[in-house]
């Protein structure tokens, strides 16, 4: 059984999103493309990147794409894992790039991708309201991006403690609630 | 198919709660009552209120009820959307009103409502412990309120990226776990 | 019908985790063991502990185990409720004990337990990134611990507004995603 054409894997910190997403892609014939959006700003992040890398086999072709994620998705000829949307959004916002254009380009690239395409994103909107405007804006933009991608995705999962809860497809049709 | 008599729509920031709740009510014959609890304290909030308003058609009868939500629910003769519980709770707490009495009145009004009644609330308890006492108290009160309303509701959904996960009714009977 | 041998109850603050967990254990013949990990550092915590205690009947045998939770689980001869993992983890981290050894001992004790064993934990990873290193480390460790316990558990639930969403067992096999 093949993975869905486009899967969105959401969840909190350390909820097992990346491992689950890797297993989804590794169910396809190798090789696989890994699009990494993390930038090693500090030791903490460098350590996380190294840990993620050490877990992946040699069949992964890794590319660092802190900003130009839409093009990389379009160019990929293998099953693609994007890890993760949250850091890409952070990079776009910190660079003060045109977020609206960047998001539109990302949605378009994902929609046009042949797949399998698996996108990982951090759910960040379930705590109390952040006390700074940047935090509030970031979680608004992340929520909007996730909603738009989820609308296009064939499959959306919400990770809890390493386990996937299926959000889409569901028994409920959100376009026609009753 | 009619909406449930009482539906509780929970979810994080920008999870699509309001849009989903509006679609639920708009599945009923117009007109519909929109009970808005937001107060325009600052530009950020004013912008959100305007955005929400611009999305709704002319069949909505909007009322601003920052505090007296129980009475407005009781008086409504049309399908009612309450958006949102979180801001109402904030208003009650900031006014140093009797929270216990206000909550009891709200539960009673919701229980007595003919429906359809759709209540939107922000889930705020899934981040790390807030570093200030007010934040901790707020998320405790919000959690308690949601639990009491969920116990009365015919239907509870948890929104993820614009998609509803059905929490109630479920295959599991929480009063008789096994 | 008997509770599962090992159940992990996750959820946010005031999501009804403890009440639900107590009902699960109380479905077994009394007596029951309550392993409390809370330490009364301040009035706020003292009040929560008293509230939790007042709710439980005399058939509960309560033990305070801020640190030596693995041994207490191993020694218990009755159905066991652990409330909660989050405070135990906090205690281990604040004592600067060997977290890796403590976690391994806990996993081993849970795996060896005859059950029924119900473990309660706070989901803390769904807000924006904490602005201090300790907060980030704590939510990483909590997430890792939950993942490891969830892998061993027969049943995992995610509480929303007092209602359980079943995470495991699910229709999806996470070890063989497709």
Image: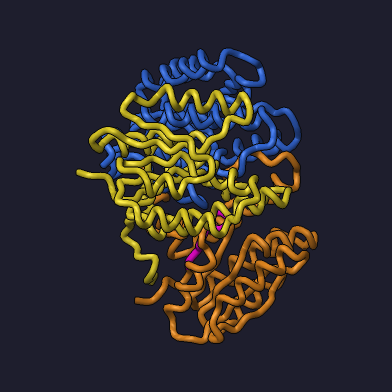
Chain colours: A yellow, B orange, C blue
Rendered residue at 56%/75% (across/down)? B55
Quarter residue A169 falls in: bottom left
Rendered residue at 47%/36% (across/down)? A36
| Image quarter (top left, top right, bottom left or bottom right) of the N terminus of chain B | bottom left
Residue C84: image location, x then y, percent: 54, 31
Q: Quick check: C165 left or right of C63?
A: left
- Farthest residue, direction left: A1
Q: Is residue B12 magenta?
A: yes
- Residue A40, compared with residue A131, is above or below; it is above
C10 and B49: which one is in front? Answer: B49
**Numbered disc total:** 0
Q: Quick check: C2 left or right of A142?
A: left
C161 and B111: which one is in front? Answer: C161
Is residue A48 something that shows in the picture? yes
Q: Is residue B113 magenta?
A: no
- Residue B69, compared with residue B91, is above or below; it is below
Q: Quick check: B10 left or right of C155?
A: right
- Residue A84, compared with residue B111, is above or below; it is above
Residue B137: image location, x then y, percent: 70, 47
Rendered residue at 51%/28% (across/down)? A49
Quarter residue C55 falls in: top right
Most common secondary structure along the magenta stretch: strand
Residue C79: image location, x then y, percent: 41, 28
- Residue A87, compared with residue B34, is above or below; it is above
Residue B54: image location, x then y, percent: 60, 77
Is residue C57 something that shows in the picture? no
| Image quarter (top left, top right, bottom left or bottom right) of the C terminus of chain B | top left
Rendered residue at 36%/48% (across/down)? A7
A82 and C71: which one is in front? Answer: A82
Q: Which residues are magenta?
A: B7-14
């Amino acid at each position: 059984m093949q993975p869905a054409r486009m899967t969105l894997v959401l969840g909190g910190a350390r909820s097992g999103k990346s491992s689950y997403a890797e297993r989804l892609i590794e169910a396809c014939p190798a090789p696989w493309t890994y699009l990494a959006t993390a930038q090693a700003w500090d030791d903490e992040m460098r350590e996380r990147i190294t840990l993620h890398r050490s877990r992946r086999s040699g069949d992964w072709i890794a590319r660092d794409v802190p900003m130009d994620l839409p093009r990389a998705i379009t160019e990929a000829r293998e099953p693609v894992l994007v890890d993760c949307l949250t850091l890409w959004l952070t990079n776009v916002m910190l660079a003060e790039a045109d977020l609206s254009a960047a998001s539109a380009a990302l949605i378009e690239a994902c929609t046009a991708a042949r797949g399998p395409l698996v996108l990982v994103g951090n759910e960040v909107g379930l705590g109390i309201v952040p006390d700074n405007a940047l935090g509030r804006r970031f979680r608004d933009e992340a929520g909007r991006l996730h909603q738009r991608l989820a609308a296009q995705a064939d499959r959306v999962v919400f990770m809890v403690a390493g386990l996937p809860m299926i959000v889409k497809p569901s028994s409920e049709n959100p376009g026609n609630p009753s």
